[in-house]
Each structure stands twice: as structure tokens, then as C-alpha cells.
Image (cartoon, grey):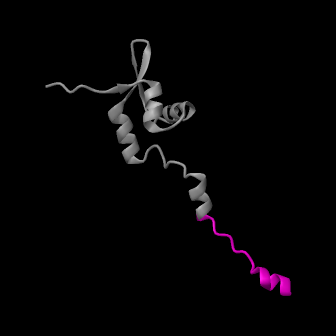
Amino acid sequence: MATVKSFLTTEEAIRYLRTSRPTLWRLEKEGKLKPYRIGASLRWDLEELDRAVRSGALGQRRKSRKSRVDEVHVERPDVDAVESS
């Protein structure tokens, strides 16, 4: 029995990967993703997108600003010690 592949349009691939159009094209240029030409349209193989995500080939998603701020620990001098000097 033949398997049926699922292909996504560029817009669907962008939404599926939760990325932007420039990032999708950068990943294609870097050889991490490969679109297929079907007629006059480009399509992205859903299985290949899943494989790339699972393998980490697409890199880590950027952390939200809040989580990046939470990771920064700034040593601040004790205000009372500074004022009494």
C-alpha cells in the first residue's frame, strides 16, 4: 500500500513551525529544510519539518523576554552599606 505524504504551503509551514518567512527561507538556504516544487507552487513535506524539529536542526526557540530577564542575576550592593560609608 502506498503512503500518502502531507505537504504544506509556505504559509502553513510558517504557522506550523511558528516562525517567520525570512527564517523559513534562511533555513532553506542553510540546507536544513527543502521545499518541493509541485507545479508552479512550493510545498514543504510535513514529515521533514517534524524530523527537523525533533532533531534540533532548527535550533532552539528564542526565550521570551521574561525568561531571559529571570536568568540574569545582578549583584547589587546593599543600599544601607553604601549609605553608611
Residue 71 spot, x, y in % from top left: 58, 64
Indicate left or right for 62 with 73 as reference: left
Indicate left or right for 53 with 2 as reference: right
Q: Is residue 84 above or below residue 17?
A: below
Query: Which quadrant: the N terminus?
Result: top left
Which residue is at the far bottom?
A: 84
Residue 33: name its quadrant: top left
Question: Is residue 60 located in the magenta-colored stretch of the structure?
Answer: no
Q: Residue at x 84, y 87 (%)?
A: 84
Q: Nearer the viewer, residue 33 or 22?
A: 22
Residue 62 spot, x, y in % from top left: 54, 49
Residue 44 spot, x, y in % from top left: 40, 27
Q: Residue at x 51, y 33 (%)?
A: 24
Residue 40: name its quadrant: top left
* Magenta span of residues: 71-85
Residue 79: name its quadrant: bottom right
Indicate left or right for 62 with 57 as reference: right
Query: Which quadrant: the C terminus?
Result: bottom right
Residue 6 spot, x, y in % from top left: 31, 27
Q: Residue at x 48, y 47 (%)?
A: 59
Q: How many marks?
A: 0
Which residue is at the far top?
A: 39
Q: Residue at x 39, y 12 (%)?
A: 39
Q: Nearer the viewer, residue 80 or 57?
A: 80
Question: Is residue 77 located in the magenta-colored stretch of the structure?
Answer: yes
